[in-house]
Amino acid sequence: MRISDVIRHKGQSVVTICSDATIQDLVALLAEHRIGAVVVSDDPDAGVVTGIVSERDVVRALQGAGQGFFATPVSQIMTADVHTCAPDEEIEAVAREVTDRRIRHVPVLVDGQLAGIVSIGDIVKHRIDELQMERDQLTTYIQG
């Protein structure tokens, strides 16, 4: 199975934010969409990935933050060195990378442009669904 199978199932919608948006804007976006991470893109129409920022980044940045924390630009807490994948990558390989790098969200790029995003939760759900289907097929085969 490939990442394209996960994207096909969950959809290609990706929530983005500009790097000069405030952390307050970011927190509102995370809450509004009930998501854990947002792709940072200063040119979302072109699908350019500038970075990625997650609720974990916000929590970590809160340590020792001053009174103006929520007015801080997203660029101050985002990860600029973003690990990405392509739709034709094997799910198992991406799952290994996510686990090894201790990250939860991976933007999917096609020809350098943002085409989707997968999370470790998406990968696990897809694998569970796949195992259930295999189990059902084996049960049907055994029962004749």
Image: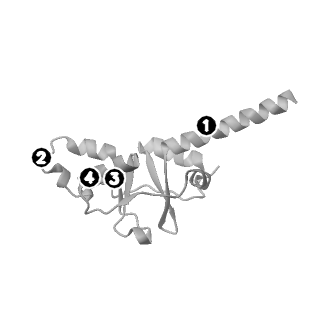
What distance separates the C-alpha of mark 1 from that of mark 4?
33 Å
Earlier along the polypeptide chain: callout 2 or callout 1?
2
The answer to which image quadrant residue 76 occupies is bottom left
Q: What residue type is disc 1 on?
A: Ile
Q: Position of residue 2 (x, y in %)?
A: 62, 52
* Apparent side of residue 18 relative to residue 128 in the rendered image (left or right): left
Instruction: Please name the residue shown 52% across and 58% down the image.
Output: 12
Q: What residue type is disc 4 on?
A: Ile
What distance separates the C-alpha of mark 3 from that of mark 1?
29 Å
Q: Which residue is mark 3?
A: 29
Question: Of helix, strand and loop, which one carries label 3?
Answer: helix
- Toward the front, the furthest residue is 32
- Tell me if label 2 and label 3 are in contact, CB under 8 Å: no
Earlier along the polypeptide chain: callout 1 or callout 4?
4
Earlier along the polypeptide chain: callout 3 or callout 1?
3
Q: Position of residue 128 (x, y in %)?
A: 61, 37
Q: Which residue is mark 2?
A: 66
What distance separates the C-alpha of mark 2 from that of mark 3?
22 Å
Question: Of helix, strand and loop, which one carries label 2?
Answer: loop
Instruction: Please name the residue shown 23% across and 57% down the image.
Output: 22
What distance separates the C-alpha of mark 4 from that of mark 3?
15 Å
Q: Which residue is mark 1?
A: 128
**1 or 4: mark nearer the eye:** 1
What distance separates the C-alpha of mark 2 from that of mark 4?
14 Å
Earlier along the polypeptide chain: callout 2 or callout 3?
3
**4 or 3: mark nearer the eye:** 3
Q: Nearer the viewer, residue 85 or 57?
A: 57
